[in-house]
Amino acid sequence: MKIDPWTSAQYADYSKLRDEFGIEPFDIEGLPEPDRLMRRGVIFGCRGFEYVRKAIMEKRPFIILSGLMPSGRMHLGHKMVIDQIKYYQRLGAHIYIAIADIESYAARNMPLDKAEKIAIEEYVLNYIALGLESKDTQIYFQSKRQAVKDLAYLLGKRIIWSQYSAIYGFEETTNLCHIFSPLVQVGDILHPQLKQYSGPLPLLVPVGVDQDPHIRLTRDLCNAHRLLNVTFTKDGKVGIFVKGEDDVQKLLDKAKDEMRAMGYSDLNMIPKYKALYIPGAAESDIPNINEALIKMEASLNEYTFYPAAATYHRFITGLTGGKMSSSNPPSAIFLTDSPEEGAKKVRSAVTGGGATVEEHKKSGGRPEVCGVFELFVYHLLDDDNELKAIYDGCKAGKRLCGECKAQAATLLKPFLADLGAKREAARSRVKDYLRYD
Ligand code: TRP
Ligand code: SF4
């Protein structure tokens, strides 16, 4: 059975967002054992997922890159990223996690030494306690990784201020460290594909949709550094084009060799147009062709990258009705909350229930806007059938908010207790994850 109780007002907003920004729907078809967040549409969109999908299907290596702002306490909203990273880790991904200490210094005024402490105590310990493995995982600091800062500096060559400020809308009073920090994030996202790390590979960044501007900037800069592009032309042909003015003939020849090696024998080179047409190729062959070109270009240009892909997850509703946010503690279940604190927040949560019990019984509740229901959807219930029963019961006015709260508190308490114990056990393993270069 496939349940989809989330085609709600809120979900409609996400699809509007998707349409507005050209984000593609996230299709889990064919992914091995999609996790809870994928099955339930919490991950609602993506950009450029096709290379990662292909790598997963063909059991080839790929990269997951994520980042955290070490400025506040880790709550259940942040846990979603780790759940996804664990999924991809099981499939064999190389894992990189940035501690965004430059960003938190620039944007939140957080000193670097304090950021390090918060990153370890609030995030790294919880990541380990939640089950992130150290194999093929590195957690590093933006401020300490030279390759990240070099990329930030040098890739910036290919974007001009008018484009950049149109993306971010900085003010006259924004400090320049803050203005520079999106480029540092681009450095985060792309550096795993450098030779001295994993080399060019399909790469995915699982994020909340608020990070989309950084993803677009990154993808634009990937594209801007390519020597060749492959497109489907207006007259229905697949063509490879040299982008710059240099080495046109050499690049066309190399592209031709690559296409021959892929089995395309009918090739039409027109140097005047800086073009190589492949009449035998279909539009759906473009990812394969581009992948071959990326590998070839990487030997000529060290800044050749697979275009970074992203998936976008919905934000979890807070227990006070709005967003779950560290700056509003009653709204959030922090991973370091004691079981009793957590349960207390659940018990006093704003729900989607009717104004009175009579009202609720008569007209039903609104699970689609209910923070307690979202706890089940995102974190506490694995069984899709049970979830559906709660949803239907609420809609029909048969299920009351008190029952949901009691059940959520009952599930949350052992989860938080167990996590606390695992955090203590994790302390000695932090060094297996952290890199100081
Ligand atoms: N900007 C992100 C945030 O606000 C943190 C971050 C830094 C990040 N580098 C990243 C996220 C790279 C994903 C990928 O949370
Ligand atoms: Fe939310 Fe449960 Fe109340 Fe429905 S019954 S509004 S799901 S707490």
Image (cartoon, rainbow, N blue to C red):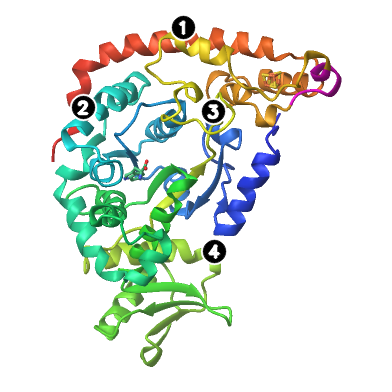
Vertical order, 74 against 418 (above or below):
below
Relative to 151, 210 lies left or right: right
Image quadrant in which you'd find residue 322: top right
Image quadrant in which you'd find residue 216: bottom left
Give the magenta range.
359-365
- Residue 340 — which label? 1
Q: Mark 2 or mark 1, which is nearer the start of the sequence?
A: 2
Vertical order, 131 against 267 (above or below):
above
Closer to the camera: disc 1 or disc 4? 1
Image quadrant in which you'd find residue 362: top right
Considering the numbered disc 4 on the image, is that residue within a helix, a strand or a loop? helix
* Residue to which mark 3 is pinned: 318
Label 3, label 1: how many angstroms apart (C-alpha)? 18 Å
Label 1, label 2: how many angstroms apart (C-alpha)? 26 Å
Q: What residue type is labelled 3?
A: Gly
Label 2, label 4: how many angstroms apart (C-alpha)? 48 Å
* Residue to which mark 2 is pinned: 117
Q: Which amino acid does label 2 sit on?
A: Lys
Considering the numbered disc 2 on the image, is that residue within a helix, a strand or a loop? helix
Q: Mark 4 or mark 3, which is nearer the start of the sequence?
A: 4
Q: Can residue 247 be seen in this view?
A: yes
- Residue 215 — which label? none
Label 3, label 4: how many angstroms apart (C-alpha)? 42 Å
- Residue 284 — which label? 4
